[in-house]
């Protein structure tokens, strides 16, 4: 990217973020599929979490396939075929996955359902590899992280409406408390429509002005660090890979085990759970919209105002979507007070990624502890607030882990994306543990994840300072 670029290229950026929307829509919809599949296929809680495992392990498999093909070709695959073709290919793969939902629903095959989700996520793996650096490339480097945050906010718009749309398709009603019967065959329609959307967006992106081969975005120049032969020789990356694994793990497992907790322990009907899953993913959107402020203005006074307005604007989107779905909004208004904790934590972090990671991880531990120690709606809101405190962690970890890697930066990035598999493995582990100690108590898994993230935040600061790297600028972004 040329340093002369002083503005975000909105004409290129806007079509690109449609893929971020899809990632969120499908990932959050899995939280509705889990209890549906559990009942339809008579699964244990651990078995039902195979939905998350199949989806997120595909990111690792996709990364390995990508690296293998690049190794055989002796050239990076995306550099060879171009970024637009890479996005189109990823969308095409995901579309193929959605086709499996038709025979899977007709035959009642859980294995085919999992296979469809796996292939959809394989396509997402390639899309992630291409879309993240593209988002950074579409404007000045100084606002690249804010563009990732904005893209993450679009991602979480998908996570906010995904559970509602899929719940409507399965139960035939969006009205809370409606007496409706689920049908496993009704799953195929939204996913076939989604597959068609994948193909339409692939065509849109193919003919868009998105560059096929953008220039390199960022490479930190450091004579000492750049001399290392592999990204795996950097302790900040090795520890960061574990951090990405447990971060995605706690983000996904908190939501994917929440429906079972609400249904079994709190006696909610399955069709009444969707608004709360939507609230969890909207919480990530709330945090990421707050972090995206810098992409729109450099005026510090305006940024301070928008830091307060943005989270409540995102909360308003959640309320609007649920109002359209005819859900009772009364229980959700109090959540506006919890958002104040996010704003205070964001101000306290002063934009330093290590400090932000430490503060938000401690708040995540507190939220899960409260959720485990209380009952009723208090525990539900404690668990959903984990989304607020996860919202900024991806960019913090990602930035800290690749800092100082120099020529090994892109290799390090691919290793980090591979660790998205934690979303499936941690969810499955919590599901299995819940069969022994109960679902509410099983959230101890999330506390352990946040404890490692807090440790990483403390440890990596010293590692980077030893390499002459210190942070005093804000960082933001999103998975």
Image: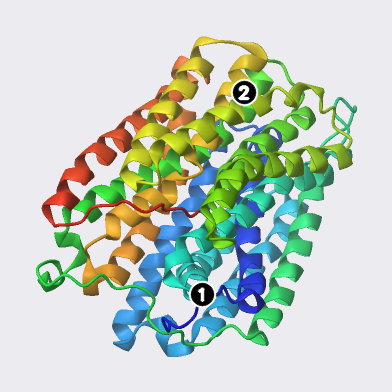
Which image quarter: residue 215? bottom left
Q: Is residue 353 visible?
A: yes
Q: Position of residue 296 (x, y in %)?
A: 59, 61
Q: Position of residue 30 (x, y in %)?
A: 63, 45
* Left or right: 384 in relation to 448: right
Residue at 45% over, 69% down: 129
Residue at 55% over, 68% down: 123
Q: Is residue 187 above or below residue 359?
A: below
> Between tags 1 and 2, which lies in front?
1
Q: Position of residue 339 (x, y in %)?
A: 60, 31
Residue at 46% over, 37% down: 347
Q: What separation in Å lies between label 1 and label 2 (alpha carbons)?
A: 38 Å
Q: Are marks 1 and 2 in contact (CB under 8 Å)?
A: no
Q: Which quadrant is home to the N terminus?
A: bottom left
Between 46 and 285, the residue placed more toward the observer is 285
Residue holding disc 1: 139
Q: Is residue 384 visible?
A: no
* Disc sitting over residue 381 in the figure: 2
Residue at 39% over, 71% down: 65
Q: Secondary structure at mark 1?
A: loop
């Amino acid at each position: 990217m040329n340093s002369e670029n002083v503005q975000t290229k909105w004409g290129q950026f806007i079509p690109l973020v449609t893929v971020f929307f899809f990632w969120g829509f499908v990932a959050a919809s899995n939280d509705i599929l889990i209890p549906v599949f559990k009942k339809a296929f008579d699964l244990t809680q651990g078995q039902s979490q195979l939905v998350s495992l199949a989806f997120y392990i595909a990111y690792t498999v996709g990364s390995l396939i990508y690296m293998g093909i690049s190794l055989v070709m002796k050239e990076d695959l995306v550099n060879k075929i171009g970024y637009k073709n890479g996005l189109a290919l990823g969308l095409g793969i995901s579309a193929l996955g959605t086709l499996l939902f038709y025979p899977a629903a007709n035959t009642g095959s859980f294995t085919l359902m999992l296979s469809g989700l796996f292939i959809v996520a394989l396509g997402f793996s390639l899309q992630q590899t291409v879309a993240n650096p593209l988002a950074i490339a579409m404007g000045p480097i100084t606002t690249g992280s804010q563009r990732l945050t904005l893209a993450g906010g679009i991602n979480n718009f998908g996570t906010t409406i995904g559970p509602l749309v899929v719940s409507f398709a399965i139960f035939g009603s969006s009205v809370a408390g409606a007496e409706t019967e689920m049908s496993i065959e009704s799953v195929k329609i939204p996913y076939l429509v989604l597959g068609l959307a994948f193909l339409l967006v692939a065509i849109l992106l193919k003919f868009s002005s998105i560059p096929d081969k953008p220039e390199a975005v960022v490479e930190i120049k450091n004579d000492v660090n750049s001399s290392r032969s592999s990204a795996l020789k950097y302790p900040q990356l090795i520890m960061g890979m574990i951090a990405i694994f447990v971060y995605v793990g706690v983000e996904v497992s908190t939501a994917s085990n929440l429906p079972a907790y609400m249904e079994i322990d709190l006696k909610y009907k399955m069709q009444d759970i969707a608004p709360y899953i939507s609230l969890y993913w909207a919480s990530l959107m709330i945090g990421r919209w707050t972090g995206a402020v810098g992409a729109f203005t450099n005026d510090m006074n305006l940024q301070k105002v928008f830091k307060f307005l943005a989270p409540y604007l995102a909360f308003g989107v959640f309320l609007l979507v649920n109002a359209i779905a005819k859900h009772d909004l009364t229980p959700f208004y109090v959540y506006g007070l919890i958002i104040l904790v996010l704003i205070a934590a964001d101000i306290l972090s002063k934009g330093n990624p290590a400090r932000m990671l430490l503060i938000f991880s401690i708040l995540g531990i507190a939220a899960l502890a409260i959720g485990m120690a209380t009952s009723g709606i208090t525990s539900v809101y404690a668990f959903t607030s984990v989304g607020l405190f996860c919202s900024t962690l991806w960019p913090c970890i990602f930035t800290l882990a690749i800092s100082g890697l120099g020529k090994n930066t892109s290799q390090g990035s691919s290793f980090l994306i591979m660790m998205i598999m934690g979303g499936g493995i941690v969810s499955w582990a919590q599901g299995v543990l819940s069969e022994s100690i109960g679902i509410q108590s099983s959230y101890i898994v999330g506390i352990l994840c946040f404890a490692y993230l807090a440790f990483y935040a403390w440890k990596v600061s010293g590692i980077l300072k030893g390499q002459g790297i210190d942070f005093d600028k804000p960082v933001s972004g999103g998975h």
